[in-house]
Image (cartoon, rainbow, N blue to C red):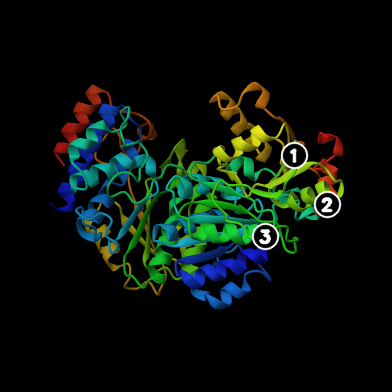
Amino acid sequence: MTSLELSKKIRLKVLDLVYKANASHIGGAYSMTDLLAVLYTDILNINPELPNNPDRDRFFLSKGHTCAGLYATLGLKGFFKIEELDSYAQNGSKFLSHTSHHISGVEISAGSLGHVLSISCGVAYACKLKNENQQIICLISDGELNEGSNWEPIMFAPHHKLDNLILIIDYNKIQSFGNVKDVIDIEPLKQKFEAFRWNVLEVDGHNHNEIKVALSNSKLNCNSLPTVIIANTIKGKGVDFMENKLLWHYKSPNLEQYTEAKKQLEKL
Amino acid sequence: MRTAFITQLIEEARKNDKIFLIVGDLGFSVVEPFVEEFPNQFLNIGIAEQNMAGVAAGLALEGYCVYIYSIGNFPTLRCIEQIRYDICYHNLNVKIIAVGGGYSYGSLGPSHHATEEIGMLRTIPNLTVCSPGDPIEAKELTKLSANTYGPCYIRLGKAGEPIVHESDFEMKIGNFLPIIVGEKNALFTMGATLKYAKDYVLNNKLNASVYSFPFVKPINKTNILNLFIKYENIITIEEHQFDAGFGSAILEVLNDLIEEGLLTNIQIPKIKRIAIPNKFFSIAGTQDYLRNAAGVILETNFFKN
């Protein structure tokens, strides 16, 4: 399955999950879908049969509220039976609507923003101590950069030359209650990270080839520094009436919207 | 206590290369021997306690037994959500070490008075909460923590506390330690009030037992039931706010044992709690001065003849 094929399946599965569970956060799941599809198709060295293999690459999702995207990806890649996901966010389900480390393939639970980059730094530091060569990849949201706790590891990682760490920012420009630029403008983002001594790459977060090239080449010119990939994305990407709409941070589609969204996604 | 801690941690690190110590830019004249012997198992993470707790969680995910070390409120309250969600929810092998428990750093003011953290931390599942009463207990708790998987909080004093224990003992999770044996009255002490409690009973020739409680959570229910049955009058003392601290923990256990039908009405002891009266004290002073100001003091009329 190519990353493009996977991304289409992820979007369709996420649509089913949030529709059935009447759940939120489909917009943020769609903005990161292409990133996940490329990671799990072309980049991450992870075997679904051996999800705890010590040699595996580590993927840490910090924007845990968009876990439907990660669950769909893991289910489609065979970390668990995809039918198990039918219980998503239902009473008694282990598939919470924030990432749960009790699910095969999920490295860390996340729901409170601004925690996971520090954890990723700890793992990257440990892997270096042990002279191991895994890649540690952490995906955060743009609004999450409001959290001061993110700027502590942003200072920490280059100081300790964590060149085994890649941070991906899902820069969809919309956070929980407004546009990022209106709530707390994080620009100039590239220059901020450069000033903090990160190796900075920018990509179109929906262009699979650009994502793949950036992730594959991150180590080539990084000068022993961690890499940040600023992925310019679109909230709700793939369904025209969801794209760039704050509403789809919260809303779950009704039957009519579900049917229309499914029609659009099947044409991708 | 902090010297006893670091000396024992060095012992443990000699046996276990997965021991890792992170400090939040503190530890001057304390941690240097560890750093010298184990430079690759040490990190000064800077003044960034949330990152300290998160990085510790990451190292623990990779198999390390991680100690994070700072003053009082900084490795606890400042990063309490990282402790709850990252360390305790994932049940990771991280040990939180606070120096300056209670009023140890009295004159530095309320920012440095660690007087609420026990109450906050003991509500968090998976976390063992400890407060040694003297350097021997600090040493034994360090040893136990290094050899027992799971999150643990240890509230240390500072340096130079007197040794109270005169004989060896075995430190077991949840157990308390007899210091003086008397009748009718029992004085339960948590942490650095141990020496004061012991001296008070001896100097006033009171007919009272003194027990040190290195563990606020858990407390061994079977063992404490025997004390509730044995003593009609119990006094708890702690350098912590009145609500949710050590005395509260004792009351909770007592209540549960009554509710379970394990104590009859005539066996239920009277319990007097001595703690900080839910107030901040914005005055300079030594640890003893602040204890007195806050009313963390014993009176002979608390004891029955």
> Where residue A180 sits in the image (x, y, percent)?
46, 44
Picture layout, residue B55 above or below residue A132: above
Q: Mark 1: give few (<14), some (14-19) or many (20+) Cα within 10 Å.
A: some
- Disc 2 marks a residue whose amino acid type is Asp
- Disc 1 marks a residue whose amino acid type is Glu
Residue B288: give its label: 2
- Disc 3 marks a residue whose amino acid type is Ser
Residue hosting label 1: B183
Residue at 38% from the left image edge and 67% from the top image edge: A127
- Letter of the chain that mark 2 sits on in the rendering: B
> Where residue B50 sits in the image (x, y, percent)?
54, 53
Whichever of callouts 2 and 3 sits on the residue coming sooner in the sequence is 3
Question: Which residue is at the front of the view, B182 or B129?
Answer: B182
- Letter of the chain that mark 3 sits on in the rendering: B
Asked whether residue A143 appears in the rendered view, the answer is yes
Q: For numbered disc 3, what is the local secondary structure?
A: loop
Same subunit, tags 2 and 3? yes
Q: For numbered disc 1, what is the local secondary structure?
A: loop
Residue hosting label 3: B167
> Where residue B2 sits in the image (x, y, percent)?
66, 63
Question: Which residue is at the front of the view, A70 or B269?
Answer: B269
Asked whether residue B48 appears in the rendered view, the answer is no
Whichever of callouts 3 and 1 sits on the residue coming sooner in the sequence is 3
> In screen coordinates, is B208 left or right of A51?
right
